[in-house]
Amino acid sequence: MTATPLAQDDPVLRLCNITKRFGALTANDGISFDLARGEVMALLGENGAGKTTLMNILFGHYSADDGSVEVFGQTLPPGQPGAALRAGVGMVHQHFTLADNMTVLDNILLGTESLWKFGLGRGAARARVAALSRDFGLEVDPDAVIAALSVGERQRVEILKALYRDARILILDEPTAVLTPQETDALFDTLRRAVALGLSVIFISHKLHEVMAISTRVLVLRHGRLVGAVATQDTDRHKLAEMMVGAEIIPPAPSKATPGVPLLMLNRVTTAGLRDVSLTLRAGQITGLAGVSGNGQGALADLLSGLAVPRAGTLEIAGDTVTDWTPRRAIAAGIGRIPEDRHKTGTIADFTLTENAILETYADIPNSRYGWMDWRGAEQRAEAIIAQYDIRCPGPGTRIRLLSGGNMQKLILGRVLEESPRVILANQPVRGLDIGAVTYVQNQLLNARDSGAAVLLISEDLDEILTLSDVIHVISEGRLSPAFPRGTMKPADLGQWMAGQGFEYAA
Amino acid sequence: MRLEAIANPTLARSIGLPVLALVATFVVGGMLAMLAGANPLLTFGLILKGAAGSKFALLETLNRATPLIFTGLAVAVAFRARLWNIGAEAQLYAGALVTILIGTKLALPGVVLIPLMGIGALVAGGLVLLGPVLLKTRLGVDEVVTTLLLNFIMLLVISMLLEGPLKDPMGMGWPKSEAIPRDARLPRLVEGLRLHWGFGIAILSAIVVWVIQTRTTLGYEIRAVGLNAAAARFAGIPVGKVMIKTALLSGGLAALAGFSEVAGLRGTLTLDLSPGFGYTGIVVAMLALLNPLGVVVSAIFVAGIFVGADGMSRAAEVPTYIADILLATALLFMVLAILLTKFRVLRG
Amino acid sequence: MNEIVDILISASFWAAILRIASPLIFATMGELICERAGVLNLGIEGIMVMGAFAGWIAVYAGLPLWGGVAVAMLSGMAFGLIHAVLTVPFGLSQHVVGIGITLIATSSAYYAYRLSLPEVTSPPRIEPFQPVDIPGLSDIPFIGTALFSQTPLTYFAFFTVLVVAFVLYRTPLGLALRAVGENPSAVEAQGLSVTALRMGAVIVGSGLMAVGGAFLTLSAFSSFFFEMVNGRGWICIALVVFGAWSPSKAMMGALLFAGFDALQVRLQQTSFGAMVPYQVFLMIPYILSILALVLMSRRANVPAALMVPYNRGER
């Protein structure tokens, strides 16, 4: 793999003064660091701190404006995807890069052989994958089709892909975001085995307790700059948080809730992704829904949004069973919906702020009358939202595509809250936002709760659920756990439920 | 290479690039003319002369533009909603067929027949597109292929009818329908000028479509569905219904082309009523950037090229198909130019 | 009814199925390759016209028949290249570009035809591919005449299916092609170029479509006519869907389709056929295509990234 033999303590990876600008924005500003053999280095930073850009440069997806990348003493040619792979760097992306229609084995084999080779040699490959699975504790059926695998299994395939290519450096981007606490422990076990075998690991995260648990050293990025590099044993969560944000983090401290009447009830509802689910959302209360992604959160959100109808069971709003259930009915019934994906379902990228602000109310006065648009009325509404929710933009005529994620989310929030909804469905409301926007959105949800709304908060971030929720349910394979009041469950207990344990007993 | 969105494109960029696209088109056309052994400038001069060199030529161009305005509007309306209606040809013939049926089978005075034929055509065209759209919204069948295939089916249906029940007994064996009565023809727009009211109706339709798109909730819904159907559905816009309304409007507009050609120009129905007006409507709409008022301008431009090329090929040894190549080239260059007004190309 | 039985037991009927299926198989394989890589190629109709013309004019100009096939393929690849550049790196609408390619390829073929033969009223004929008997197999009664006395291009069509299936499922290249149509970032993450794979697929696929067109002039009709492709390209797009993006199933679809086509031609000549307008028979292929699309709509395993352009670094 290397031309010149390396001394045991030479760095395996060295980034030198990496700088990358996008227009006026400097995404990476003179970043340098070394990675040693057998260490787990955590790369910590908020969304937008420049972690992803840095990895894209390392993998040749972008070429840096300045600086160099050395792997095992050899400089990588800039802007050539594949060079890092061939040099022995493997990446496990946050969004899995797997072809769902192919088997595990085929995904692992993809790109490992010359394209013009005759035949695949699946037999030998299968044996090697089996050996790697055993050595690293990554159990998965090589002949299973990806589409049939759980999220945790898919992540194992991603790691196997890297190991199969003889990666000596493993980079994992937010690997625990999609795992249960127990799966996270298993992942950490795999990483420890890898390090013991002489591999090096870069662990990208913003979860402080995990960084403290797995890493030997922590680098902190903020606004594209490297602002700190410390040995893990010499620091603590508090100091890291301050370094990451540049100021002390004050998590929202919810006051005690005063739950009121039930506003929305599901009675033994079954849909395409839900199995016999009963749920009560009460006024003045935040109900948290914890679970590994893809276990029915989307189905529940679709149901409350009006995109799906119960196959069995009933949905009651303020005591009335709904029929002929559509998104429009849901809005009319007073459900405010913050969708999971603000780019794909929350907004229309090429619409202006005004047009996006009236997406759910365009058919009502003052936005239109008798089928005729009143653009002046619509614009006034947009201006009111922009002012009240502090949306940074050139004006209501700006295409929303040009706004940051945080400002986009504020527009959605404003659009929803301006209608004074009785029930709020907040599906991953802070995913991908920076700390400032996260705090803003969370406080708005708490305010809505305090003024009497029933809030359903869906999140994969257990910390967020534990901080904000007055009551917690866990969802697993479309089934809902009993309600756990605030303070009765520890993360590990919820993890048991997230892994699907306890449901049979409860049922 | 990578594409990066430009926040505020300069005026030079947003106007210069489309102009460049047209220039490039004519460079390609010039090379084709040279391939035929003709002088490019002379060829373009002849095309211009043939299209607008005389009052007669200009009126011919406007006459030819009339069906193209209708099919261009049909495509522009549909594409806005990301409904890929490639079946304007079939809808045009459906409109022509209904026009003939009403015009020749109902013994009514012209003042009654004309609006009846127009409305009949409008409905027929809408219904022809409704099928593929229902297949799309209900079953997820791609409408591109179904609307394309319907073009072939519709032409065979017309052929069958023209050789059967609709055949003109006085037609000397040609597959041709009976003519609609004189007083049911569209009158001339201006007395003495060979330009019928179909052109007037086309202009009015363009204005109506423009008003619908910019001033009504339906226009807002259509744009929302076209730009992001998932977000539109989530926001409570009834996507299926909007698609159906779009289909009825689009199909109806295309059918008006058939109505206007039969009632305004030909008087009868034959199998060569449309030399591909439906397909050319796609080029017209794209060159107009799907803007209904722009469709009028681009239809006249496209018609001018066709009419001009006819005149040119009589004088020079360049085949008329150069017009089709020019327009297809313009289409491709234009979509590329429009992209580059919004994105810049980066390396690496 | 007896007439139908007569048709079904005649070897010439079965031979005709293979002959009618051949151009469809070439073009369907071409479209399938494009779509497996994530690109819908609506240029197919025009590329077939261009292939029909280019192959024929090359042979007319003196090239051997296989030279004509090669010229046709190159002409198709040239238009495929334009399609690929516009839809892959630039990510333009595959619908609009495809229609544009069909318009430009068709009109270019017609323009070139008029340029090369300005005076003729009916196109000159060439000496087309002749049936070749496969030694041994062609002597089998009935089956031999039905299946093993075809022109070389027909054998080549079926060989193409084998090659496409082998490449797709048994080679690293096929793995990459299937992956790039499903999730391009999977391909990118493994160090392969999404752009190169997709462009390559569109170019090669377009070459095959053009060979499908050339079959019409070099093997079936021996002359070039306007409108001779007559919607076959669109039918092939329906066949790809019908075949659920699998080469073998798409081939079966093409054969089934050709079967109906061969049957309708023969039914027209029966006493029953005389009672029905001939247009009804001509409509059958188009109606069957729509039915095929409707039938498969619920269970087609369409490549997940079909028609989704890929912009590097963007997630």
Image: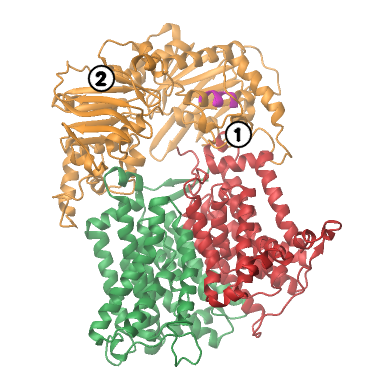
Quickly name the residue at label 1. Answer: A82
* Chain that appears red: C
Q: Residue at x 25, y 59 (%)?
A: B214
Instruction: Report how far apart the C-alphas of labels 2 and 1 lie in the structure.
Output: 45 Å
Chain A drawn colour? orange
Q: Is C18 within the magenta?
A: no
Disc 1: which chain? A
Q: Is residue B305 left or right of residue C24?
A: left
Q: Nearer the viewer, residue B122 or A243?
A: B122
Chain B drawn colour? green
Q: Is any part of residue B83 visible from this angle?
A: no
The amino acid sitting under disc 2 is Ser
Q: Nearer the viewer, residue C310 or C180?
A: C180
Q: Disc number at residue A176?
A: none
Q: Is A156 within the magenta?
A: yes
Q: Residues within 10 Å of mark 1 (few under 14, many from 20)?
A: many
Residue ranking furthest to the right = C136
Q: Nearer the viewer, residue A89 or C24?
A: C24
Q: Is residue A250 left or right of residue C28?
A: left
- Magenta residues (range): A155-161
**Residue C241 position within the rendered picture, expressed as x and y whole percent measured from the top left:** 54, 52
Q: Quadrant of residue A336?
A: top left
Quadrant of the drawing holding the N terminus of chain C: bottom right
Give whichever of discs 2 and 1 has the lower sequence position.
1
Quickly name the residue at label 2. Answer: A469
Q: Quadrant of residue A490?
A: top left
Q: Is residue A416 left or right of residue A25?
A: left
In the image, residue B194 above or below residue B230? below
